[in-house]
Amino acid sequence: MLLHINEPGQAAPQVAKVPAIGIDLGTTHTVVAVARGGQVTVLTDADGRRLLPSVVNIDGIEHASTKRRMGSGEVLPVQAASMILAKVKHMASVTLAQDITQAVITVPAYFDDTARQATKDAAALAGLDVLRLINEPTAAALAYGLDAAAEGIYVIVDLGGGTFDVSVLNMQKGVFQVIATGGDTQLGGDDVDQALYDAFLAAAHYEQTLTHMERQRLQMLVREAKEKLSTQDGADVFIALQERDCAHRFMRDDLDRLLNPILRRCLAICEQVLTDAKVERPQIAEVVLVGGATRMPAFQAAITQFFGRQPLCTLNPDEVVAMGAAYQAAALTGDGDSLLLDVTPLSLGIETMGGLNEKIIHRNSPIPCMKQQVFTTYQDGQTALLVHVVQGE
Ligand code: ADP
Ligand code: MG
Protein backbone atom coordinates (compact mmCIF):
# COMPACT_ATOMS: atom_id res chain seq x y z
CA MET A 1 0.00 0.00 0.00
CA LEU A 2 1.21 3.45 -0.86
CA LEU A 3 0.33 6.48 1.28
CA HIS A 4 0.70 10.11 0.37
CA ILE A 5 1.14 12.34 3.40
CA ASN A 6 0.48 16.03 2.83
CA GLU A 7 0.83 19.12 4.99
CA PRO A 8 -2.57 20.53 5.98
CA GLY A 9 -3.92 22.72 3.22
CA GLN A 10 -1.47 21.41 0.64
CA ALA A 11 -2.82 19.74 -2.48
CA ALA A 12 -1.86 16.17 -3.17
CA PRO A 13 1.06 15.93 -5.61
CA GLN A 14 -0.03 15.14 -9.18
CA VAL A 15 1.63 11.90 -10.19
CA ALA A 16 1.26 11.01 -13.86
CA LYS A 17 0.09 7.46 -13.62
CA VAL A 18 0.64 4.84 -16.27
CA PRO A 19 -2.68 3.07 -16.78
CA ALA A 20 -3.05 -0.69 -16.62
CA ILE A 21 -5.09 -2.30 -19.39
CA GLY A 22 -7.81 -4.95 -19.40
CA ILE A 23 -7.43 -7.80 -21.88
CA ASP A 24 -10.05 -10.31 -23.01
CA LEU A 25 -7.84 -13.00 -24.50
CA GLY A 26 -10.63 -14.71 -26.43
CA THR A 27 -10.65 -17.91 -28.45
CA THR A 28 -11.48 -16.06 -31.67
CA HIS A 29 -10.95 -12.39 -30.76
CA THR A 30 -8.79 -10.47 -28.34
CA VAL A 31 -10.08 -7.14 -27.06
CA VAL A 32 -8.19 -4.50 -25.09
CA ALA A 33 -9.69 -1.70 -23.03
CA VAL A 34 -8.55 0.96 -20.62
CA ALA A 35 -10.54 2.75 -17.91
CA ARG A 36 -9.53 6.22 -16.83
CA GLY A 37 -11.47 8.49 -14.55
CA GLY A 38 -14.36 6.03 -14.58
CA GLN A 39 -14.59 6.06 -18.40
CA VAL A 40 -13.77 2.93 -20.33
CA THR A 41 -12.40 2.93 -23.90
CA VAL A 42 -11.88 -0.04 -26.19
CA LEU A 43 -8.55 0.40 -27.98
CA THR A 44 -8.13 0.00 -31.74
CA ASP A 45 -5.16 -1.27 -33.73
CA ALA A 46 -3.49 0.57 -36.63
CA ASP A 47 -6.29 -0.61 -38.96
CA GLY A 48 -8.97 0.70 -36.62
CA ARG A 49 -10.07 -2.75 -35.49
CA ARG A 50 -11.50 -3.15 -31.99
CA LEU A 51 -11.52 -6.95 -32.12
CA LEU A 52 -8.16 -8.47 -32.98
CA PRO A 53 -8.27 -11.98 -34.43
CA SER A 54 -6.66 -14.43 -31.97
CA VAL A 55 -4.61 -15.89 -34.79
CA VAL A 56 -0.82 -16.13 -34.93
CA ASN A 57 1.57 -17.03 -37.69
CA ILE A 58 4.48 -19.21 -36.61
CA ASP A 59 6.95 -20.20 -39.33
CA GLY A 60 4.40 -19.53 -42.03
CA ILE A 61 1.67 -21.60 -40.40
CA GLU A 62 -1.50 -19.96 -39.09
CA HIS A 63 -2.74 -21.05 -35.70
CA ALA A 64 -6.23 -20.19 -34.46
CA SER A 65 -8.26 -21.16 -31.39
CA THR A 66 -5.14 -22.29 -29.52
CA LYS A 67 -6.76 -21.07 -26.28
CA ARG A 68 -8.73 -24.31 -26.21
CA ARG A 69 -5.50 -26.16 -25.47
CA MET A 70 -4.21 -23.74 -22.82
CA GLY A 71 -2.80 -25.65 -19.87
CA SER A 72 -2.50 -28.88 -21.83
CA GLY A 73 1.27 -28.85 -21.33
CA GLU A 74 1.79 -28.06 -25.00
CA VAL A 75 4.13 -25.15 -25.81
CA LEU A 76 2.11 -23.80 -28.74
CA PRO A 77 -0.88 -22.30 -26.84
CA VAL A 78 1.45 -20.39 -24.48
CA GLN A 79 3.58 -19.25 -27.40
CA ALA A 80 0.51 -18.14 -29.37
CA ALA A 81 -0.98 -16.32 -26.37
CA SER A 82 2.33 -14.56 -25.68
CA MET A 83 2.53 -13.40 -29.30
CA ILE A 84 -1.01 -12.00 -29.10
CA LEU A 85 -0.28 -10.34 -25.75
CA ALA A 86 2.97 -8.81 -27.06
CA LYS A 87 1.00 -7.34 -29.94
CA VAL A 88 -1.64 -6.02 -27.56
CA LYS A 89 1.02 -4.48 -25.30
CA HIS A 90 2.60 -2.75 -28.28
CA MET A 91 -0.74 -1.54 -29.61
CA ALA A 92 -1.78 -0.15 -26.22
CA SER A 93 1.59 1.54 -25.72
CA VAL A 94 1.31 3.25 -29.12
CA THR A 95 -2.33 4.27 -28.65
CA LEU A 96 -1.88 5.53 -25.11
CA ALA A 97 1.58 7.00 -25.87
CA GLN A 98 2.96 5.43 -22.69
CA ASP A 99 4.87 2.26 -22.01
CA ILE A 100 2.12 -0.11 -20.86
CA THR A 101 3.39 -2.93 -18.66
CA GLN A 102 0.49 -3.92 -16.43
CA ALA A 103 -2.71 -5.74 -17.25
CA VAL A 104 -5.69 -7.60 -15.93
CA ILE A 105 -6.38 -10.60 -18.15
CA THR A 106 -9.59 -12.59 -18.23
CA VAL A 107 -9.88 -16.37 -18.38
CA PRO A 108 -12.87 -18.72 -18.63
CA ALA A 109 -14.36 -19.61 -15.25
CA TYR A 110 -13.58 -23.29 -15.87
CA PHE A 111 -9.81 -22.73 -16.38
CA ASP A 112 -7.91 -24.76 -13.78
CA ASP A 113 -4.66 -23.65 -12.12
CA THR A 114 -2.53 -25.10 -14.92
CA ALA A 115 -4.41 -23.15 -17.60
CA ARG A 116 -4.33 -20.00 -15.45
CA GLN A 117 -0.61 -20.40 -14.85
CA ALA A 118 -0.06 -20.94 -18.59
CA THR A 119 -1.87 -17.64 -19.23
CA LYS A 120 0.39 -15.89 -16.71
CA ASP A 121 3.47 -17.47 -18.31
CA ALA A 122 2.34 -16.19 -21.70
CA ALA A 123 1.96 -12.68 -20.27
CA ALA A 124 5.40 -12.82 -18.65
CA LEU A 125 6.91 -13.86 -22.00
CA ALA A 126 5.22 -10.85 -23.59
CA GLY A 127 6.65 -8.54 -20.94
CA LEU A 128 3.32 -7.92 -19.25
CA ASP A 129 2.90 -7.88 -15.50
CA VAL A 130 -0.43 -9.53 -14.66
CA LEU A 131 -2.04 -7.59 -11.85
CA ARG A 132 -4.72 -10.23 -11.66
CA LEU A 133 -6.49 -12.86 -13.68
CA ILE A 134 -10.25 -12.59 -13.41
CA ASN A 135 -13.02 -14.82 -14.68
CA GLU A 136 -14.67 -13.75 -17.94
CA PRO A 137 -18.22 -13.86 -16.51
CA THR A 138 -17.13 -11.78 -13.51
CA ALA A 139 -15.60 -9.21 -15.83
CA ALA A 140 -18.86 -8.98 -17.77
CA ALA A 141 -20.77 -8.48 -14.52
CA LEU A 142 -18.36 -5.69 -13.54
CA ALA A 143 -18.81 -3.97 -16.89
CA TYR A 144 -22.53 -3.76 -16.14
CA GLY A 145 -21.76 -2.41 -12.67
CA LEU A 146 -23.48 -5.37 -11.05
CA ASP A 147 -21.00 -5.29 -8.16
CA ALA A 148 -22.88 -2.19 -7.03
CA ALA A 149 -26.31 -3.72 -7.76
CA ALA A 150 -28.50 -5.79 -5.46
CA GLU A 151 -26.89 -8.85 -3.87
CA GLY A 152 -28.03 -12.07 -5.42
CA ILE A 153 -27.73 -14.52 -8.26
CA TYR A 154 -26.52 -13.44 -11.70
CA VAL A 155 -26.31 -15.66 -14.77
CA ILE A 156 -23.79 -14.90 -17.50
CA VAL A 157 -24.44 -16.53 -20.88
CA ASP A 158 -21.50 -16.34 -23.32
CA LEU A 159 -21.78 -17.51 -26.93
CA GLY A 160 -18.50 -16.74 -28.68
CA GLY A 161 -16.97 -17.96 -31.92
CA GLY A 162 -16.19 -21.48 -30.84
CA THR A 163 -17.35 -21.86 -27.26
CA PHE A 164 -20.48 -21.58 -25.17
CA ASP A 165 -20.21 -20.87 -21.45
CA VAL A 166 -22.85 -20.38 -18.80
CA SER A 167 -21.88 -19.23 -15.32
CA VAL A 168 -23.98 -18.66 -12.24
CA LEU A 169 -22.50 -16.01 -9.97
CA ASN A 170 -23.51 -15.18 -6.45
CA MET A 171 -22.77 -11.57 -5.58
CA GLN A 172 -22.49 -10.62 -1.92
CA LYS A 173 -20.97 -7.33 -0.70
CA GLY A 174 -19.56 -6.61 -4.16
CA VAL A 175 -17.78 -9.96 -4.37
CA PHE A 176 -18.71 -12.45 -7.08
CA GLN A 177 -18.39 -16.15 -6.47
CA VAL A 178 -18.84 -18.63 -9.28
CA ILE A 179 -21.33 -21.15 -7.93
CA ALA A 180 -21.61 -23.18 -11.09
CA THR A 181 -20.22 -23.07 -14.56
CA GLY A 182 -20.72 -25.24 -17.60
CA GLY A 183 -20.60 -25.15 -21.32
CA ASP A 184 -19.35 -26.69 -24.50
CA THR A 185 -15.93 -25.89 -25.94
CA GLN A 186 -17.17 -26.95 -29.38
CA LEU A 187 -20.30 -24.81 -29.69
CA GLY A 188 -20.46 -21.26 -30.98
CA GLY A 189 -20.86 -18.90 -33.89
CA ASP A 190 -18.58 -21.13 -35.99
CA ASP A 191 -21.25 -23.84 -35.93
CA VAL A 192 -23.76 -21.39 -37.34
CA ASP A 193 -21.26 -20.51 -40.08
CA GLN A 194 -20.83 -24.20 -40.88
CA ALA A 195 -24.59 -24.72 -41.12
CA LEU A 196 -24.90 -21.74 -43.48
CA TYR A 197 -21.94 -22.96 -45.51
CA ASP A 198 -23.54 -26.37 -46.05
CA ALA A 199 -26.94 -24.78 -46.75
CA PHE A 200 -25.41 -22.48 -49.36
CA LEU A 201 -23.76 -25.30 -51.33
CA ALA A 202 -26.94 -27.39 -51.09
CA ALA A 203 -29.10 -24.49 -52.31
CA ALA A 204 -26.70 -23.84 -55.20
CA HIS A 205 -26.58 -27.58 -56.04
CA TYR A 206 -22.82 -27.32 -56.20
CA GLU A 207 -21.23 -30.74 -55.97
CA GLN A 208 -17.63 -30.14 -56.87
CA THR A 209 -15.09 -30.17 -54.02
CA LEU A 210 -14.00 -26.67 -53.07
CA THR A 211 -10.34 -25.68 -53.07
CA HIS A 212 -8.77 -24.49 -49.83
CA MET A 213 -8.99 -20.86 -51.01
CA GLU A 214 -12.62 -21.25 -52.05
CA ARG A 215 -13.51 -22.78 -48.70
CA GLN A 216 -11.90 -19.92 -46.80
CA ARG A 217 -13.63 -17.33 -48.98
CA LEU A 218 -17.05 -18.96 -48.62
CA GLN A 219 -16.57 -19.31 -44.86
CA MET A 220 -15.94 -15.57 -44.67
CA LEU A 221 -18.94 -14.75 -46.87
CA VAL A 222 -21.43 -16.86 -44.93
CA ARG A 223 -20.13 -15.41 -41.68
CA GLU A 224 -20.74 -11.91 -42.99
CA ALA A 225 -24.23 -12.94 -44.09
CA LYS A 226 -24.93 -14.39 -40.63
CA GLU A 227 -23.85 -11.16 -38.95
CA LYS A 228 -25.99 -9.07 -41.33
CA LEU A 229 -29.01 -11.24 -40.57
CA SER A 230 -28.90 -10.01 -36.97
CA THR A 231 -30.11 -6.63 -38.21
CA GLN A 232 -31.50 -7.37 -41.70
CA ASP A 233 -34.22 -9.65 -43.05
CA GLY A 234 -32.09 -10.97 -45.90
CA ALA A 235 -28.44 -11.29 -46.92
CA ASP A 236 -26.96 -12.26 -50.29
CA VAL A 237 -24.02 -14.56 -50.75
CA PHE A 238 -22.28 -14.64 -54.10
CA ILE A 239 -19.11 -16.54 -54.94
CA ALA A 240 -17.32 -17.34 -58.21
CA LEU A 241 -16.31 -20.97 -57.87
CA GLN A 242 -14.14 -23.03 -60.22
CA GLU A 243 -17.00 -24.70 -62.06
CA ARG A 244 -19.47 -21.80 -62.03
CA ASP A 245 -20.76 -18.81 -60.11
CA CYS A 246 -23.07 -19.52 -57.17
CA ALA A 247 -25.50 -17.17 -55.48
CA HIS A 248 -28.12 -17.51 -52.79
CA ARG A 249 -30.17 -15.12 -50.71
CA PHE A 250 -30.55 -16.17 -47.08
CA MET A 251 -33.57 -14.91 -45.19
CA ARG A 252 -33.72 -14.48 -41.41
CA ASP A 253 -36.17 -17.42 -41.30
CA ASP A 254 -33.64 -19.70 -43.02
CA LEU A 255 -31.06 -18.82 -40.40
CA ASP A 256 -33.53 -19.34 -37.56
CA ARG A 257 -34.35 -22.81 -38.88
CA LEU A 258 -30.66 -23.73 -39.05
CA LEU A 259 -30.21 -22.34 -35.58
CA ASN A 260 -32.78 -24.60 -33.95
CA PRO A 261 -30.48 -27.51 -33.10
CA ILE A 262 -27.78 -25.11 -31.89
CA LEU A 263 -30.23 -23.26 -29.64
CA ARG A 264 -31.48 -26.54 -28.21
CA ARG A 265 -27.92 -27.47 -27.22
CA CYS A 266 -27.43 -24.04 -25.61
CA LEU A 267 -30.63 -24.29 -23.58
CA ALA A 268 -29.83 -27.83 -22.41
CA ILE A 269 -26.56 -26.46 -21.00
CA CYS A 270 -28.37 -23.56 -19.30
CA GLU A 271 -30.72 -26.07 -17.72
CA GLN A 272 -27.84 -28.23 -16.48
CA VAL A 273 -25.91 -25.31 -15.01
CA LEU A 274 -28.96 -24.07 -13.11
CA THR A 275 -29.44 -27.59 -11.74
CA ASP A 276 -25.77 -27.74 -10.69
CA ALA A 277 -26.11 -24.35 -9.01
CA LYS A 278 -29.38 -25.44 -7.34
CA VAL A 279 -30.90 -22.20 -8.57
CA GLU A 280 -34.51 -21.74 -9.65
CA ARG A 281 -35.23 -19.23 -12.39
CA PRO A 282 -37.22 -16.78 -10.20
CA GLN A 283 -34.18 -16.40 -7.90
CA ILE A 284 -32.09 -14.88 -10.69
CA ALA A 285 -31.51 -11.12 -10.39
CA GLU A 286 -30.18 -10.59 -13.92
CA VAL A 287 -29.13 -12.53 -17.02
CA VAL A 288 -26.20 -11.02 -18.96
CA LEU A 289 -25.38 -11.73 -22.61
CA VAL A 290 -21.73 -11.97 -23.59
CA GLY A 291 -20.08 -12.94 -26.88
CA GLY A 292 -20.62 -11.69 -30.42
CA ALA A 293 -22.95 -14.53 -31.38
CA THR A 294 -25.52 -13.46 -28.75
CA ARG A 295 -26.41 -10.66 -31.20
CA MET A 296 -28.51 -13.18 -33.13
CA PRO A 297 -32.17 -12.28 -32.47
CA ALA A 298 -33.19 -15.95 -32.34
CA PHE A 299 -30.62 -16.57 -29.62
CA GLN A 300 -31.88 -13.60 -27.61
CA ALA A 301 -35.46 -14.77 -28.01
CA ALA A 302 -34.59 -18.29 -26.86
CA ILE A 303 -32.75 -16.97 -23.78
CA THR A 304 -35.55 -14.54 -22.94
CA GLN A 305 -38.08 -17.34 -23.14
CA PHE A 306 -35.97 -19.80 -21.17
CA PHE A 307 -35.21 -17.45 -18.28
CA GLY A 308 -38.57 -15.69 -18.43
CA ARG A 309 -36.91 -12.27 -18.49
CA GLN A 310 -35.11 -9.83 -20.78
CA PRO A 311 -31.35 -10.32 -20.57
CA LEU A 312 -28.95 -7.38 -20.20
CA CYS A 313 -27.42 -6.69 -23.61
CA THR A 314 -26.96 -2.93 -23.86
CA LEU A 315 -23.13 -3.08 -23.95
CA ASN A 316 -21.31 -4.55 -26.95
CA PRO A 317 -21.33 -8.28 -26.21
CA ASP A 318 -17.89 -8.80 -27.73
CA GLU A 319 -16.38 -5.97 -25.69
CA VAL A 320 -17.97 -6.30 -22.24
CA VAL A 321 -15.38 -8.74 -20.90
CA ALA A 322 -12.48 -6.44 -21.82
CA MET A 323 -14.39 -3.50 -20.36
CA GLY A 324 -14.83 -5.24 -17.03
CA ALA A 325 -11.15 -6.21 -17.02
CA ALA A 326 -10.26 -2.55 -17.65
CA TYR A 327 -12.34 -1.40 -14.66
CA GLN A 328 -10.58 -3.95 -12.51
CA ALA A 329 -7.16 -2.89 -13.84
CA ALA A 330 -7.98 0.72 -12.96
CA ALA A 331 -9.14 -0.26 -9.47
CA LEU A 332 -5.93 -2.22 -8.89
CA THR A 333 -3.80 0.77 -9.85
CA GLY A 334 -5.77 3.10 -7.64
CA ASP A 335 -8.00 4.64 -10.31
CA GLY A 336 -11.47 3.57 -9.30
CA ASP A 337 -13.16 1.35 -6.79
CA SER A 338 -14.81 -2.07 -6.88
CA LEU A 339 -11.87 -4.27 -6.02
CA LEU A 340 -12.64 -7.92 -6.31
CA LEU A 341 -11.59 -10.70 -4.02
CA ASP A 342 -9.95 -13.66 -5.64
CA VAL A 343 -11.35 -17.10 -5.04
CA THR A 344 -10.12 -20.58 -5.87
CA PRO A 345 -12.00 -21.66 -9.01
CA LEU A 346 -11.78 -25.38 -8.22
CA SER A 347 -11.50 -27.40 -5.02
CA LEU A 348 -8.14 -28.59 -3.78
CA GLY A 349 -7.80 -31.84 -1.95
CA ILE A 350 -5.66 -34.89 -1.47
CA GLU A 351 -6.12 -38.40 -2.67
CA THR A 352 -6.88 -40.84 0.12
CA MET A 353 -6.83 -44.63 0.22
CA GLY A 354 -8.92 -46.16 -2.54
CA GLY A 355 -8.41 -43.24 -4.88
CA LEU A 356 -10.91 -40.93 -3.22
CA ASN A 357 -10.51 -37.17 -3.37
CA GLU A 358 -10.84 -35.59 0.04
CA LYS A 359 -11.55 -31.93 -0.62
CA ILE A 360 -9.77 -29.68 1.86
CA ILE A 361 -10.07 -26.24 0.34
CA HIS A 362 -13.44 -25.93 -1.34
CA ARG A 363 -13.96 -24.07 -4.59
CA ASN A 364 -14.72 -20.38 -4.29
CA SER A 365 -12.76 -20.01 -1.04
CA PRO A 366 -11.36 -16.48 -0.94
CA ILE A 367 -7.57 -16.63 -1.25
CA PRO A 368 -5.10 -16.65 0.40
CA CYS A 369 -6.59 -19.30 2.61
CA MET A 370 -5.29 -21.90 5.06
CA LYS A 371 -6.98 -25.13 6.15
CA GLN A 372 -5.98 -27.98 8.41
CA GLN A 373 -7.22 -31.52 8.48
CA VAL A 374 -5.99 -34.62 10.28
CA PHE A 375 -5.47 -37.90 8.40
CA THR A 376 -4.37 -41.24 9.78
CA THR A 377 -1.85 -43.55 8.17
CA TYR A 378 -3.19 -46.65 6.46
CA GLN A 379 -1.06 -49.26 8.25
CA ASP A 380 0.49 -49.55 11.71
CA GLY A 381 4.17 -48.71 11.75
CA GLN A 382 3.99 -46.83 8.47
CA THR A 383 7.02 -44.52 8.21
CA ALA A 384 6.41 -42.74 4.92
CA LEU A 385 3.53 -41.51 2.85
CA LEU A 386 3.02 -40.04 -0.56
CA VAL A 387 0.69 -37.05 -0.75
CA HIS A 388 -1.13 -36.64 -4.05
CA VAL A 389 -2.69 -33.18 -4.27
CA VAL A 390 -5.59 -32.95 -6.71
CA GLN A 391 -7.61 -30.06 -8.08
CA GLY A 392 -11.13 -30.21 -9.43
CA GLU A 393 -14.62 -31.22 -8.51
P1 ADP B 1 -14.66 -15.27 -28.57
O1 ADP B 1 -14.98 -14.84 -27.20
O2 ADP B 1 -14.84 -16.74 -28.81
O3 ADP B 1 -13.31 -14.79 -29.01
P2 ADP B 1 -16.57 -13.33 -29.73
O4 ADP B 1 -17.30 -12.97 -28.52
O5 ADP B 1 -15.76 -12.26 -30.38
O6 ADP B 1 -15.72 -14.65 -29.59
O7 ADP B 1 -17.67 -13.87 -30.80
C1 ADP B 1 -17.35 -14.19 -32.10
C2 ADP B 1 -18.57 -14.75 -32.78
O8 ADP B 1 -19.61 -13.78 -32.76
C3 ADP B 1 -18.32 -15.09 -34.25
O9 ADP B 1 -18.92 -16.33 -34.56
C4 ADP B 1 -19.02 -13.95 -34.98
O10 ADP B 1 -19.43 -14.30 -36.28
C5 ADP B 1 -20.20 -13.71 -34.06
N1 ADP B 1 -20.82 -12.41 -34.28
C6 ADP B 1 -20.26 -11.18 -34.21
N2 ADP B 1 -21.13 -10.22 -34.54
C7 ADP B 1 -22.29 -10.85 -34.84
C8 ADP B 1 -23.58 -10.41 -35.28
N3 ADP B 1 -23.84 -9.13 -35.50
N4 ADP B 1 -24.53 -11.35 -35.48
C9 ADP B 1 -24.28 -12.67 -35.28
N5 ADP B 1 -23.09 -13.14 -34.89
C10 ADP B 1 -22.10 -12.24 -34.67
MG1 MG C 1 -15.20 -14.43 -25.29
Image (tube, grey):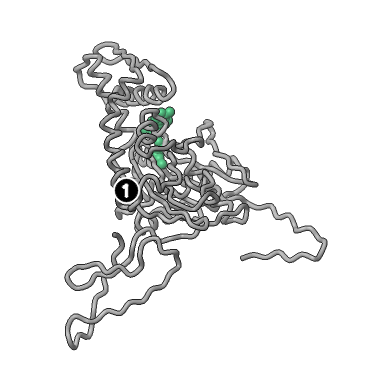
From the top left corner, tell me how far across and down residue 60 is, in percent. Answer: 35, 37
Residue at 26% x, 11% y is 244
- Outermost residue on the bottom side: it is 381
Q: Locate the N terminus by quadrant.
A: bottom right
Give the class, few, some or many, for how many residues have Cα within 10 Å of label 1's Cα (few <14, many ≥20).
many
> Quarter of the image holding residue 267?
top left
Residue at 40% x, 34% y is 294
Q: Above or below — where is 212 with respect to 234?
A: below
From the top left corner, tell me how far across and down residue 366 is, in percent. Answer: 44, 64
Task: Look at the image and tell me whether residue 145 can be seen.
Answer: yes
From the top left corner, tell me how far across and down residue 326 is, in percent. Answer: 54, 47
From the top left corner, tell me how far across and down residue 252 is, in percent. Answer: 36, 20
Q: Locate the C terminus by quadrant.
A: bottom left
Question: What residue is disc 1 on?
Answer: 273
- Outermost residue on the front side: it is 282
Is ligand 2 closer than 8 angstroms to the Cβ of mark 1?
A: no
Q: Above or below — where is 170 with respect to 289?
A: below
Dot 1: element: helix
At label 1, the amino acid type is Val
Task: Look at the image and tell me whether residue 55 can be seen.
Answer: no
- Outermost residue on the right side: it is 9
Quadrant of the rendered image holding ligand 1: top left
